[in-house]
Image (cartoon, rainbow, N blue to C red):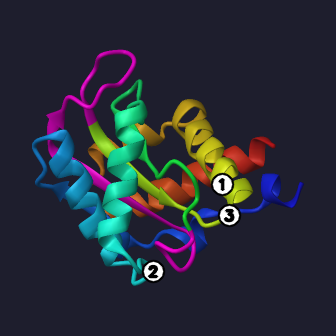
Amino acid sequence: HFLRQAALLPQMIRPAFIDPVLPAKTKSSVLREMVRLAGKTDRVWDSRGLLAGLQAREKLCSTGLPGGLAILHTRQPEDFLFESLFLVLGRTVQQIPFGAPDGGPTVLFFLLACPDERLHLHSLARLCMMAQKTGLLPNLRSAADAAAMYDHLIAAENEVLSKG
């Protein structure tokens, strides 16, 4: 019950964890670039393990979603890979074919890392709700820089929480 009303993003992401000009051009380079970005959080213990976990999850089924968004994550919460939960966000310079169910290209990539399964599922659901029920995706696409992208994320979470 607490999770439904609590803002999660302020403890998970900062403007420094956002790259508005991710140079990746392929699915595999997106994964590498997002792991590099995750390294900026100082919460990753095993970058190679994190990359392997993301690659294994993508082999099962793409984390690409309709609307040009993907939420990268490992198959299970793997607490040996990182110290505490975090979220990083990359916006690619060019559109990436990422296997979204609508067949559309992807430009917005979240990497969600959470050592606790319940919090992981809740965070995934929160991000999906923000993407569907607010203007988050167009706002992230048009934002001028990482600080503006961060502000849009916080505002979208607050909007979802206020609708209860």
Q: Earlier in the sequence, mark 2 or mark 3?
A: 2
Q: Quadrant of residue 9?
A: bottom right
Which residue occupies 46% across, 54% down?
A: 152
Q: Are marks 2 and 1 in contact (CB under 8 Å)?
A: no
Which residue occupies 52% across, 74% down?
A: 80
Q: Earlier in the sequence, mark 2 or mark 1?
A: 2
Spatial distance from mark 2 to mark 3, Cα to Cα? 15 Å
Residue 108: percent from left, percent from top: 32, 43
- Tell me the element at label 3: loop
- Residue 39, placed above or below residue 25: below
Q: Which mark is residue 116?
A: 3
User: Circle 2: is it few (<14), some (14-19), or many (20+) Cα within 10 Å?
Assistant: some
Q: Amino acid at mark 1?
A: Asn
Circle 1 residue: 158
Q: Is residue 6 left or right of residue 42?
A: right
Circle 2 residue: 43
User: Circle 3: is it few (<14), some (14-19), or many (20+) Cα within 10 Å?
Assistant: some
Q: Is label 1 or label 3 in front?
A: 3
Is residue 148 in view from this perspective? no
Q: Quadrant of residue 130?
A: top right
Spatial distance from mark 1 to mark 3, Cα to Cα? 23 Å
Residue closer to the observer: 123 or 162: 123
Is residue 26 in view from this perspective? yes
- Residue 105, placed above or below residue 155: above
